[in-house]
Image: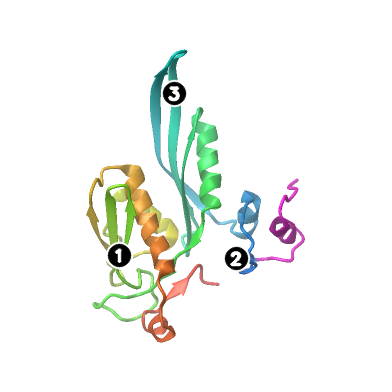
């Protein structure tokens, strides 16, 4: 039985908050995975990579695992996390839980000059994300184009609910972690841009899931 440790958790368990959107509106930080599980039960997780790290110490060889995981509902919410641990299974669970606590609403729209019709399931405008030396630029694409991006970026965008996008990449793009994180950071940048209400309508913009 879940015993909430935070005020937000108690409000969710008591039925005072019924949706994830209501939880965000309270302004309280979401610090319990159970809150996310209760309000977004349709989340899917995808382990993008498990890397073994070996290090020699005075007591012998030390092995740890580096796990990269993305979670999302395929409709406007996605989270990403990288975790380290001694055992694969426990580290994967830790990464999934951390990704759930790192969820962001995804700003979607249709900013493609090739098609100005809705609904908008691409990005509303050009945006760039960075991680290490890797830079990923997402550009609006018309409906039906698909995700023109590397595999790890595609998996992040799929769980975010984006179906069509052009992309450009620079830097060390062979790094799984940096490629996925740069793609995720591009989605974070979308939320930082101020958009006039008239442009929101023109670009068919929406944030988060469709209720």
What is the x, y in percent for residue 177?
A: 36, 44
Q: Residue furthest front?
A: 58
What residue sits 59% from the left and 68% below the top? 21
Q: Residues within 10 Å of mark 2 (few under 14, many from 20)?
A: few
Answer yes or no: do the residues labelled 1 and 2 have beta carbons within 8 Å? no
Task: Give the mark nearer the N terminus: 2 vs 3.
Answer: 2
Which residue bears the numbered disc 1? 165
Distance from Cα at disc 2 to Cα at disc 3: 39 Å
What is the x, y in percent for residue 151?
A: 31, 49
Which residue bears the numbered disc 2? 24
What residue sits 38% from the left and 70% below the top? 121
What residue sits 28% from the left and 78% below the top? 115
Q: Residues within 10 Å of mark 3 (few under 14, many from 20)?
A: few
Distance from Cα at disc 1 to Cα at disc 2: 27 Å
Q: Quadrant of residue 183?
A: bottom left
Helix or strand or loop: what does disc 1 sit on? Answer: strand
Which range of residues does the magenta coloring cover?
A: 1-18
Q: Quadrant of the N terminus?
A: top right
Colour scheme of this structure image?
rainbow
What is the x, y in percent for residue 125?
A: 32, 72
Answer yes or no: do the residues labelled 2 and 3 have beta carbons within 8 Å? no
Which residue bears the numbered disc 3? 63
Q: Is 9 in the magenta?
A: yes
Distance from Cα at disc 3 to Cα at disc 1: 39 Å
What residue sits 24% from the left and 55% below the top? 169
Q: Residue furthest top?
A: 59
């Amino acid at each position: 039985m879940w015993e909430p440790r935070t005020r937000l958790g108690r409000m969710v368990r008591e039925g005072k908050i019924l949706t994830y959107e209501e939880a965000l509106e309270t302004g309280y930080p979401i610090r319990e995975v159970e809150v996310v599980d209760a309000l977004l039960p349709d989340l899917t997780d995808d382990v993008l990579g498990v890397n073994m790290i070996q290090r020699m110490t005075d007591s012998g060889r030390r092995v740890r695992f580096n796990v990269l995981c993305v979670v999302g509902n395929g409709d406007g919410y996605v989270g990403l996390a990288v975790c380290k641990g001694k055992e694969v299974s426990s580290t994967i669970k830790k990464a999934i839980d951390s990704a759930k606590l790192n969820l962001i609403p995804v700003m979607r729209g249709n900013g493609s000059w090739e098609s100005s019709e809705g609904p908008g399931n691409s990005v509303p405008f050009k945006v760039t994300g960075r991680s290490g030396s890797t830079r990923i630029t997402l550009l609006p694409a018309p409906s039906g184009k698909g995700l023109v991006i590397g595999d790890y970026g595609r998996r992040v965008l799929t769980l975010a609910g984006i179906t069509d996008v052009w992309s450009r990449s620079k830097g060390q793009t062979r790094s799984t972690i940096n490629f996925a994180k740069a793609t995720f950071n591009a989605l974070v940048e979308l939320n930082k841009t101020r958009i006039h209400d008239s442009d929101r309508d023109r670009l068919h913009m929406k944030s988060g899931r469709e209720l």
